[in-house]
Amino acid sequence: MRNSPFWWILIGLMVLIDIYVFQVVKNLSHATAPKARLIIYSVYWIVSVAAVIVLIILPRLQFEHQAKLIKTSIFAIIIGLFLAKLAASFFFLIDDIRRSIQWVVEKLFLSSKAERAEKGEGISRSVFLSWMGLAFGGGLFGTFIYGFGNKYRYQVMRIRLSFPDLPASFRGLKILQIADIHSGSFTDKKAVAKGVEKILKEKPDIVLFVGDLVNNVADEMHDYMDVFNRIKAPMGVYSTLGNHDYGDYVHWDNPEEKKINLERLKQIHSDLGWRLLMNEHVILEKGVDKIALIGVENWSAKARFPKYGDLAKAYSGLENFPFKILMSHDPSHWDAEVRVSYPDIDLMLSGHTHGMQFGVEMPGLKWSPVQYIYKQWAGLYEEGNQKLYVNRGYGFIGYPGRVGILPEITVLELV
C-alpha cells in the first residue's frame, strides 16, 4: 500500500489540510504574547510534521505480532488527527465562502472608498466558526482515542424472529450468531476469552459463525485455538468464509502458498470443532421436523470484494424444505441475489461491515458512514417474509477500537 498512488494522495492531502488549518490557528492566536504564539506554532508544526513522517515510514516497519497494537494504534491516532482537521476544515470553508461572498458584494455595491472604509476594508475571519470548527475537530479526535477502550466490550443482542412457516419442533430455537473474529488484530487473550464466556453463558442450541476468522493468514489463529474451541452447542457449530479468509490482501511468493494457507484455514475450522460450509447445505433435524442450513463462500455485490460463493450449488435439492437459513458473509448478497432468485430463503445471517466500528445507535437514531456504501449494515432488516440480520462483528480490523458500534454477540430466537 505504501507505494500506491492513494497513499501519496493521502499524505499530500494531509499537508494541504495542515497548511489550511494553520491559518486558523494563526488568526486565533494573533492577540497572544509573542512567546505564547511561538509555542503554539511550534507544537502545531511538530505534531503535524511528525504525523506525516510517521505515516511515510510506518508501513516499512516490521512488528512482531504482540507489537502490532502499537503500529495500528499509532496509525489510528494519525488518521484520527487527520479526520479531525478535515472535519474542522468544513467549518472553516463555510466561513471562507461567506467572507468571499461578502467581499464580492461590498466591491459591487459599496463603490466609494469612503463607504468601504466605513464598512471596514478587511473582512475578518469569523471567530465563532473558527472556534466551532476546532471544537468539533477536537471532539472527533477525542472520540477516536476513547474508542480504543471499546474493542473488547462485547454486547449481547437478543432478537426474537417470527416466521409463519417455521416447523413446530423448531419453535424456540436459539441461534447464536458471531461474525468477523479477525484474530490477527487481537492483543489481549483474556479479554477475548471473556467474550467467549458470554457466548457459553447463553447456552444456544446452535452457533453460526459467518466469516472472517482471520485478517489474512491462517497462523493468526495459533494463539486463540484454545479460546474458540470451547464454543460448543447441542446442534453443532457451523461456519463460512469471509473475504479476509482467502489471503487476497497479502503478497504471496506463488499461488501454491496462498492455496496452502486456505487449506490450513479450513483445517483450523475443523480443529475448532466447527463444520465449515463451502457452498453446501446441511439438514437440521428436531423431533419430526427438518429445516435447511445453507452456507456459501464469500459473495459480494461490491466490485472490490470477491464472488467465491455459489448459492445455486449450495441450494440444490432444497426446493421442498419448508424453512431455510442462509449463512453469507456479505450483506449485499441479500438484495443482489437472495431476494431476487431465492424468495423461499427465510433468514440470512451476515457480518462484514463491522458497522464501520464508528457510528451512533440510540432510540430514534442509527447512523454510520458505512450506510452510504451498504444499505443493510447492522441489525435486522425485513422484506416481505424474508429477514436479514447483520452482526456488527466480534473483532476489529484497521482501527483498534470502536466508537458507538460495539462488538456483538447475537442471540436469535425463532418463534
Image (cartoon, helix red, strand yellow):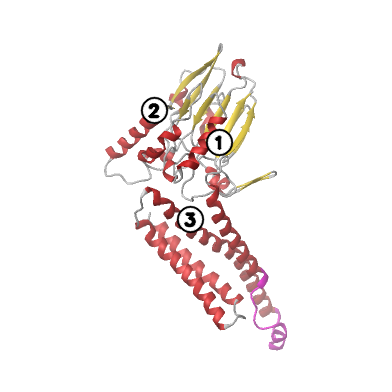
Q: What type is the residue that disc 1 sits on? A: Ile
Residue at the location (44% across, 69% down)? 49
The residue most toward the top is 288
Q: What x and y, as percent, mark residue 263? A: 33, 32
Q: For the residues marked 2 and 3, what is the alpha-carbon distance in whole angstroms? A: 34 Å
Kindly state the secondary structure of the residue where label 2 is placed: helix
Q: Earlier in the sequence, mark 3 or mark 1?
A: 3
Q: What x and y, as percent, mark residue 272? A: 41, 30
Q: What x and y, as percent, mark residue 114? A: 71, 88
Q: What type is the residue that disc 3 sits on? A: Ala
Q: Nearer the viewer, residue 144 or 69?
A: 69
Residue at the location (67% across, 74% down)? 102
- Side of 218 where 80 appears, left or right: right
Snapshot quadrant of residue 128: bottom right
Q: Is residue 124 magenta?
A: yes
Residue 49 vertical placement versus 109 (above, below): above
Q: Which mark is residue 409?
A: 1
Q: Which mark is residue 392?
A: none
Q: What type is the residue that disc 2 sits on? A: Ser
Q: Which mark is residue 76?
A: 3
The residue range painted magenta reads: 109-128
Q: Marks 1 and 3: in contact by CB < 8 Å?
A: no
Residue under numbered circle 2: 270
Q: Nearer the viewer, residue 77 or 15?
A: 77
Residue 244 vertical placement versus 346 (above, below): below
- Side of 284 where 100 appears, left or right: right
